[in-house]
Amino acid sequence: MADQAAFVSRQAARQPFEINQRQVQLDLWVRRIGKIGLLLNPVFAYFFLWAPIIVLIVFSFNAGRSVSTWEGFSTQWYQNIFSNTIAGGTEAARFTTENMLGAVRNSVIVGVGSTLLSTIIGTMVALSLVRGRFPGKKIIDSLLYLPVVIPEITQAISLAIFFKVVFDFVKLQTGLNPTTGFGTIIIGHVAFSISYVAIVVRARLADMNPRLEEAARDLGANEWRTFWRITFPLILPGVIAGALLAFTLSLDDFVITFFTSGIGTSTLPLFVYGMLKTRVPPEINAISTLMLVASTVLVAISLGLQGRNAARR
Amino acid sequence: MAAIDVELKNVVKEFTARNREGITRAVDNVSLQIHQGEFFALLGPSGCGKTTTLRMIAGFEDSTAGEILIRGKAVQHVPPFHRPVNTVFQDYALFPHMTVLKNVMFGLEMEGVPRREAEQRAREALQLVRLPNVEDRKPRQLSGGQQQRVALARALVKRPVVLLLDEPLGALDLKLRQALQYELKAMQKSLGITFIFVTHDQEEAMTMADRIAVMDQGKVLQVGTPDEIYESPNSKFVADFIGETNFVQAEVAGVSGEWVDVRLDENCIVKAVTGDQSVSVGQKVTLALRPEKINLFPVKGVVEYEEGSTETTEEYMRSLLKVPNMNLIRGRVRQAIYIGTDTRYIIRIPGDQDVVARVQNFGLRSDTFFDDGQEVNLYWNGENTRILLQ
């Protein structure tokens, strides 16, 4: 009671309400600056992100050979890469459209193969991480991010050494002589894509209400039918998104492919790198722009699917 | 007595804590018999084990010990899809990628019912829950109340032996909840299916259930009809959880059969009933007394005991004391709280304890109101004072 009385008297003795105009004006300015900052931030960020790419795209349509002076609009570099003629230089002799399309074909073979494998394995990993109960789950769960964070060169070299060891062993045991090629590239790509697929699918699964699976079982579906009728359709957008991501990563990959490819299995990025050895021919801009378009479309579809999932909930 | 649909015999469920240290006993030695065609409620605060009990009947959890029988058959380790029970989930768990009709048809499809028959039966089920014309919509396009009905139709279409309902109305607002309570009750009566439902809302349990099992900390404290539970609670927890109760500390002054004289202080003795418990003179006990059982009248002046009939307070007291086992004591109003339908009075009674009396406002507020600090007479029938030992 005494405390109550003291509180009431303090209330009564309080100073009349006053506004500190200086402080108010100052705070309003801080707010204005913040607003301008929020507006400018993305402008700077996107400039850094996009400026080099825009330069590349613009100069892929340049009429001259220069990559620094604009000489008018032309699609000649695009025409060149599809008609066996590449403008001058030592690379010109080696370039054929057939070689380029062969590299594209290799990229697609590797992309499709590694995407199929990594999507299946990655989805299964996500399922066991979200639904499974086993010792060490937490550790495995955090190891999932390892391929995402370790330097690609480390992974590439380790894969190269790994294949060497395995091949030597096989040779010693069976007398066969395995070599690097599509198989090793696909395994290499699967090795890093699994994580991306698993992360995307796991997010989707974790958002799924476990009661839905219980409801299906309650209504008479065994675990197998519950998976195919309820779980799989609901995580499918995540699986597709993961697959598209894996495919894009595979198409764009250079480092791991470089260390695991063999003769005649150059993918498009390796082919482009081969063209660059002495100087940058303008056709590179055209090829790169086409690759950019392909990747962007795939990623856009992937993001679109993930976004639709989010909107659905 | 009707046949038993579900029987639990000494069922125990233990969970190992995440860090593998220590075991929690979610359900502790529960035995229940649920009769055919009964609307049975498992009532208790959150974490009391009621949902775990329901999930064990459904087959989502295996019991650690004990036995569960459905229509006399032990169902230990029988997965949910082989049990003749269906569940309405708290959040409905409607399949978001299927239309309403497909949702309702799902269970029949799993049984292998031909498509046309399944469609026919699903439509009937939707009509039963008064929800036609939404067949082709997706669940998210429906309101909460409509989704609840779809979940009900989806479970009922399987014609289960027992329907399990896990807080089925918990996510709905008050008005809708009340309307659905009456509807569910009526539907259960006309279908004759055994309903077992879990709730933490004592009013909901009282409204719908034929019998209620009150649970706390994994144990069933009392099983009975709503009025048994309300009028004769067997423990402090039940008395406190169901409705509002005054607990009064007292000492036993005399015992004669079921009736006990209990002493509030040197000058004040009231009558109480023991239930089945035995008490002895001198024992300290707790009395439970519902606020609405207490009546008040002024210390002096007149009492209007009937429309137009008045007596002086002295006459009124004399007539009250002629009623056997009537308790009549004097108290002082500490606080009067007007809440529309009735007025709550916090009254200091002998023994320096407070009780709450609830007086319904028949007339205008000014007619019957007692002010703070005013002395009043309290009376109630001794059969409404229950002795609680636990």
Image (tube, helix red, strand yellow):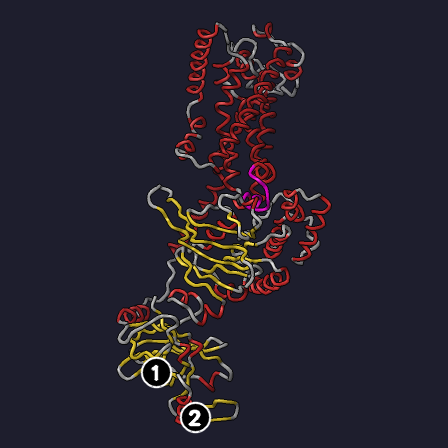
Give the residues in magenta.
A213-223
Q: Give me the C-alpha separation between circle 2 and circle 1.
A: 18 Å
Q: Amino acid at mark 2?
A: Val
Using the image as rendered, state which of residue A307 and residue B77 is in the foreground. B77
Q: Position of residue B222 (x, y in %)?
A: 43, 63
Q: Amino acid at mark 1?
A: Gly
Instruction: Confirm whether the magenta stretch covers residue A72.
Output: no
Instruction: Confirm whether the magenta stretch covers residue A220.
Output: yes
Q: Quadrant of the N terminus of chain B?
A: bottom right
Using the image as rendered, state which of residue B312 and residue B255 is in the foreground. B255
Q: Which residue is at a point 65% across and 21% down the rendered structure image?
A: A73
A182 to B279, vertically: above or below: above
Q: Quadrant of the C terminus of chain B?
A: bottom left
User: Residue tagged by mark 2?
Assistant: B302
Q: Which residue is at a point 42% across and 74% down the rendered structure image?
A: B290
**On what subunit does the disc labeled 1 rest?**
B
Q: Is residue A307 visible?
A: no
| SS category of the residue bearing label 1 | strand
A273 to B212, vertically: above or below: above
**On what subunit does the disc labeled 2 rest?**
B
A280 to B381, vertically: above or below: above
> How dense is the environment of label 2, judged by Cα within 10 Å: few (below 14), some, or many (20 and up)?
some
| SS category of the residue bearing label 2 | strand
Q: Position of residue A215 (x, y in %)?
A: 56, 46
Using the image as rendered, state which of residue B170 and residue B38 is in the foreground. B38
User: Residue tagged by mark 1?
Assistant: B331
Q: Position of residue A22 (x, y in %)?
A: 38, 55
> Which label number is shown at residue A77?
none
Q: Which residue is at a point 57% across and 30% down the rendered structure image?
A: A299
- Residue B231: quarter of image: bottom left
